[in-house]
Image: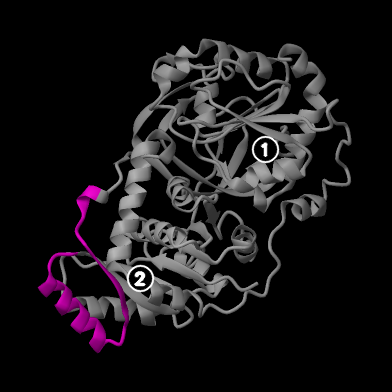
């Protein structure tokens, strides 16, 4: 497979990776290229902007959660048929999972994809020193091919001239220069940028402005030529159908299906629940489900025939009053869970199932209360399922990611969802009847049996739950 590709990296967070990556995606898309957008690491928010820029799903490449062996196949799956792929990095180029060397770093992703790297440098407080900085990043790992630099936050023509002179001496091509442009910045809050779904009209304008800025300041022809130097990838593209059929659980699956042939699995969406990986819906579909989205802020009932419910991450704390005010849907979710319907809830979904969130009534499925906290919980986790559930059999091992500024009390039920083995030992989450609820974000491509098991649970529970919610 030979897809021209670039990895957009930086020396550290806050250097302008998202600005450059999103602007490049939009600028190349406007030229008529089919651009495949990707994000290194577990982040959900940046891919929303990437999708807006390209018209294609933003996809994550996470070597910790999915394993290094799946990075290139997942990339090939997302980039199939495209003219160009742009991968936005995470943190600094060589920053990865704590204590794990290069694992999950942008550098590792670039090496796995055999992709040239463009380093975005915040040049606002330096001149000739930029050459030493770039030289260090270029020489730190000879297997990482640094193809050029984009200088961000450049103050003046004189400042640009000094930076260019220093980098010319170092033999490093300057592929773009962006001046300070605060009017293009997207708003942020406690967990990063405000998601596209919450500000779509403004986000469209922001992405268009980023495209204008990048088009004016970057050498698009040189960047495209660099992308085309990436060699072919010697791997097969990941396939949700093959992943499901190769799962050991596939032969033991329950062949029972709904009268229409496919159990309906409702997936929460809308502004309050924006965090999802595209591969989850693809795996559920491959496992035999009909995936239907609904918006807990607007819809007063679950989709017709719902026999499985997936409530992923997002910002329910921002919308607690509106979610609470939608009493018909809260009651429908509670009735669905009480009837034994399978529910997979991650982070925001966990909060929505709680009795209350910041004092506002939620669905009351869990005997627990949630609230905002001053403390940010952030990091990769290694987890093992400690209770049999509709999502995972006891003993199932997954790697995941926590990312929240809320707490739920108690933190686990009588039957916890996960036991964490690293970085600390503790149990977390709730398993009761068909409900699996936890703070842990997981990527099902790493363990397709999760989607297969959940779809089977939906098919098996269909008669009982559809009787409650026809």
Q: For marks 1 and 2, give the one nearer the viewer.
A: 2
Among the two numbered marks 1 and 2 on one chain, the one whose residue lies closer to the N terminus: 2
Image position, residue 93 (x, y; %): 40, 67
Query: In this view of the protein, which residue sits in the foreground, 365 or 149?
Result: 149
Query: In this view of the protein, which residue sits in the foreground, 6 or 255?
Result: 6
Mark 1 Cα-neighbour bin, 10 Å: few <14, some 14–19, many ≥20 = many
Q: Which mark is residue 187?
A: none
* 408 w.r.t. 276: above or below: above
At 19% across and 77% down in the image, what residue appears? 163
Image position, residue 213 (x, y; %): 28, 59
User: Is 351 displayed left or right of 287 in the figure?
Assistant: left
Location of mark 1 (residue): 386
User: Is 59 displayed left or right of 249 in the figure?
Assistant: left
The local secondary structure at tag 2 comes to strand
The local secondary structure at tag 1 comes to loop
* 306 w.r.t. 107: above or below: above
Is there any visible trace of residue 297 in the rendered image? yes
Label 1, label 2: how far apart the Cα atoms are:
43 Å
Mark 2 Cα-neighbour bin, 10 Å: few <14, some 14–19, many ≥20 = many
Image position, residue 403 (x, y; %): 45, 42
Q: How many marks?
A: 2
Is residue 302 inside the magenta stretch?
no
Is there any visible trace of residue 13 in the rendered image? no
Q: Are marks 1 and 2 in contact (CB under 8 Å)?
A: no
* 296 w.r.t. 77: above or below: above
Q: Which mark is residue 119?
A: 2
- Which quarter of the image is occupied by the N terminus? bottom right
Image position, residue 262 (x, y; %): 80, 33
- Which quarter of the image is occupied by the C terminus? top right
Quarter of the image where one finds residue 149: bottom left
User: Is 227 displayed left or right of 397 in the figure?
Assistant: left
Please provide the residue range marked out in magenta.
154-183
């Amino acid at each position: 497979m030979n897809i021209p590709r670039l990895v957009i990296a930086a020396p550290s967070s806050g250097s302008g990776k998202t600005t450059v990556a999103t602007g490049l995606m939009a600028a190349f898309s406007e030229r008529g290229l089919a651009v495949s957008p990707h994000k290194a690491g577990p982040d959900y928010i940046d891919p929303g902007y990437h999708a807006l820029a390209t018209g294609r799903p933003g996809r994550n490449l996470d070597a910790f959660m999915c394993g290094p062996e799946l990075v290139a196949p997942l990339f090939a799956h997302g980039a199939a048929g495209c003219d160009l792929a742009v991968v936005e990095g995470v943190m600094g180029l060589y920053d990865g999972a704590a204590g794990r060397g290069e694992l999950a770093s942008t550098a590792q992703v670039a090496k796995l994809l055999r992709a040239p790297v463009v380093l975005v440098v915040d040049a606002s407080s330096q001149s000739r020193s930029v050459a030493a900085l770039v030289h260090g990043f270029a020489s730190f790992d000879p297997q990482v091919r640094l193809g050029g630099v984009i200088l961000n936050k450049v103050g003046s023509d004189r400042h640009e001239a000094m930076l260019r002179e220093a980098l010319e001496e170092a033999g490093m091509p300057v592929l773009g220069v962006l001046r300070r442009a605060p009017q293009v910045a997207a708003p942020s809050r406690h967990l990063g940028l405000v998601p596209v779904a919450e500000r779509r009209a403004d986000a469209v304008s922001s992405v268009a402005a980023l495209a204008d800025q990048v088009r004016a300041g970057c050498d698009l022809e040189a960047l495209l030529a660099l992308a085309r130097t990436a060699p072919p990838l010697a791997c097969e593209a990941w396939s949700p159908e093959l992943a499901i059929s190769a799962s050991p659980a596939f032969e033991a699956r329950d062949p029972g299906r709904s009268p229409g042939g496919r159990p309906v699995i409702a997936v929460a969406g809308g502004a309050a629940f924006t965090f999802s990986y595209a591969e989850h819906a693809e795996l559920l579909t491959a496992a035999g489900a009909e995936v239907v989205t609904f918006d807990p802020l607007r819809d007063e009932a679950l989709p017709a025939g719902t026999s499985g419910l997936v409530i992923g991450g997002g910002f329910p704390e921002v919308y607690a009053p509106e979610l609470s005010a939608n009493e018909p849907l809260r009651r429908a979710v509670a009735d669905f869970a009480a009837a034994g319907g399978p529910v997979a809830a991650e982070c925001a979904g966990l909060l929505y199932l709680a009795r209350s969130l910041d004092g506002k009534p939620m669905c009351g499925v869990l005997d627990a209360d949630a609230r905002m906290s001053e403390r940010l919980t952030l990091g990769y986790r290694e987890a093992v399922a400690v209770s049999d559930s509709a999502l995972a059999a006891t003993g199932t091992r997954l790697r995941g990611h926590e990312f929240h500024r809320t707490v739920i009390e108690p933190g686990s039920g009588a039957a916890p969802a996960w036991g964490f083995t690293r970085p600390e030992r503790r149990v977390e989450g709730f398993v009761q009847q068909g409900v699996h609820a936890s703070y842990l974000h997981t990527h099902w491509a790493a363990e397709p049996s999760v989607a297969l098991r959940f779809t089977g649970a939906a098919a098996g529970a269909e008669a009982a739950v559809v009787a409650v919610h026809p």
